[in-house]
Image (cartoon, helix red, strand yellow):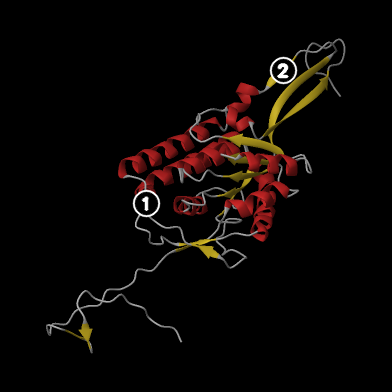
Amino acid sequence: MSKTLTKPTVKAELNGHSTNGASKKSERLPVMKTYKIFIGGKFPRTESGRYYQPVGNDGKPLANICRSSRKDVRDAVIAARGAVGGWASRSGFNRSQILYRIGEMLEGRSVQFIHELKLHGVSQAKAEAEVAAAIDLWLHYAGWCDKYQALFSSVNPTNSSHFNFSVYEPTGVVGVMCPDDSALLGLVRMIAPVIAGGNACVVVASENMPLPAVSFTEVLATSDLPGGVVNLMTGLRSELLKPLVAHMDINALVVADATADECKMLDTEATCNLKRMVYRKAGGEDQSPYFILDTQEVKTTWHPIEKGQGGGGGY
């Protein structure tokens, strides 16, 4: 049988009556929110059935957070692989529109994100600054979706009757390990350049400050972003880092604040599947289109020109 638990009242109550004869309402326990993971545009519970409880400054647990497993990583990769083709084939302008809409929605829920950062011990001023910076950074990359190709692609000189040009294409499915000390801005810093370039991603949120990250996926779920482009898991960094780098269908891995031991393990595992490794440090530059190129591949095309024709010729 289920039991209803209530906190004891300030004054002792006997048989439903307070000691002074006046009826008092008993205090109720707040309902602790269970934050789920985000895979394929849906919010399943972790396959492992495990959870952990991060605590606030007062030492009390904040929420029930899913402790994701290797199986959750596999499910997220399947969802990302199914979504990346359609997302990569969209025009840069359309991706820009979708990211801009997400930025609008982040702005509308900024009060919630500030509140959740404060629950994690961030001061009011710093929480407001972080949310504003995260929104601005997201919109920055929204603006680059349809511009980085024009900036970085090139027509290359040749010594034969050919056109030779290079363009950038998405790497594919990208694993992302977020920093532990930046709940929202660190998340945006890691995933915005990845999806702006047409990739899909499998993300592990901050272990110690996960609340804003899961709320961020609620924004994604109600936006125009196709399901599976961003998949987010919560859990322990030590448990999820190796499944990400060892998965054969993840093409690149972007890791924040990797320790020396983590770098050694990651570089060793990445050699088995030729995975591209990108290491990012917290506190560095955020707004740069070069971060988009971290998860891009260069495609170079040779186009023959028939002799006697000044323009393009046949194949």
* Left or right position of 22 against 252: left
Residue at 36 percent across and 47 percent down: it is: 114
Q: Is residue 232 visible?
A: no
Please tell me whether residue 22 is drawn above or below residue 38 in the rendered image.
below
* Left or right position of 151 against 172: left
Q: Amino acid at mark 2?
A: Val
Residue 228: x and y in percent read 62, 52
Residue 198: x and y in percent read 63, 39
Q: Which residue is mark 2?
A: 155
Please tell me whether residue 76 is drawn above or below residue 166 in the rendered image.
below
Tell me which corner region of the image, top left, top right, bottom left or bottom right, holds residue 92. Answer: top right
From the image, which quarter does the C terminus lie in?
Answer: top right
Q: Amino acid at mark 1?
A: Gln
State the residue in front, 169 or 23.
23
Among the two numbered marks 1 and 2 on one chain, the one whose residue lies closer to the N terminus: 1
Which numbered disc, 1 or 2, marks the residue closer to the eye?
1
Q: Which residue is mark 1?
A: 112
Residue at 40 percent across and 51 percent down: it is: 120
